[in-house]
Amino acid sequence: MQNNHIERSSQLFYAQLILIGLAIALLTAAGQGTLPVLTPALILSEISPISFGIWTILFGSVFLGIARLLAPRTREKFLQQILATIGIGLLIDVGYMLFKGIASASFLSQVFFVLVGCLLLAGATYLQTESQQLVFSADVLTNAIEQRSGLHLTNNFHVIDIIGLVSGILLAYFIWQSFHGIGMATFIPPFLVPYFYYLIDQAVMKLEG
């Protein structure tokens, strides 16, 4: 019984990792920005030889380091989350290369890929609720801030999303050539993902009922 629980937890963890990596890749490949928290990473990738996925790994590692200071966790859990961040970053780069040409071909394809990306993120969020495991570094940091402050910051805009969005806008302001780092994929997911999550939750409840 215990082995089955561990195996299911591992499956849900890796499923989240894959969904998050692909979702961010699709959102970014549409050429309409990316998630608010990753906007600075996207802009930096456009003005440096370092890829978006690698910048995501670097930012994610910093988030996890701060989270560990705010809410100490076991070394094994910390290393697992670091490896998940690396996996997400690599998936982002691979997915971005695969879908870039198709996703940014027209405005309709951009909208389609942003919507699919939001749906995948909602699926990952649902699995996170089911498994009670945090995979995405921004969620880990948000959770640590919640534990430290006693505030509940989930649903719609997370505090980390607001910080990422503001810092991305400021960075884009100073580096005007990269201003297109802010776009549809930056503003839509924080509002659409919770709605898709609700639809997934309702669909699962009906199937199980």
Image (cartoon, rainbow, N blue to C red):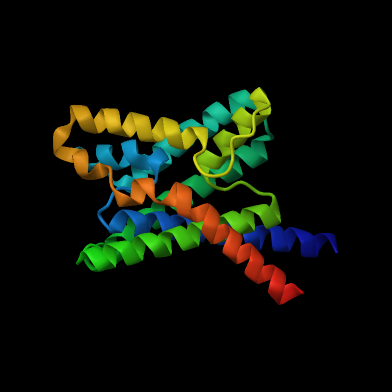
- The residue at the point 28 percent across, 61 percent down is 97
Q: Is residue 95 left or right of residue 75?
A: left
Q: Is residue 183 left or right of residue 201?
A: left
Given residues 115 and 14, the one toward you in this image is 115
Give the image location of residue 116, x and y in percent.
Answer: 41, 65
Q: Is residue 15 left or right of residue 114?
A: right
Give the image location of residue 134, x and y in percent.
Answer: 61, 46
How many numbered tags mark residues here? 0
- Asked if 184 appears above or below 75 in the picture, the reply is below
- The answer to whether one can see residue 17 in this image is no
Q: Is residue 133 left or right of residue 22?
A: right
Given residues 94 and 147, the one toward you in this image is 147
- The residue at the point 78 percent across, 60 percent down is 5
- Asked if 194 appears above or below 67 in the picture, the reply is below
- The residue at the point 70 percent across, 73 percent down is 206
Quarter of the image with the C terminus in it: bottom right
Given residues 110 and 53, the one toward you in this image is 110
Quarter of the image with the N terminus in it: bottom right
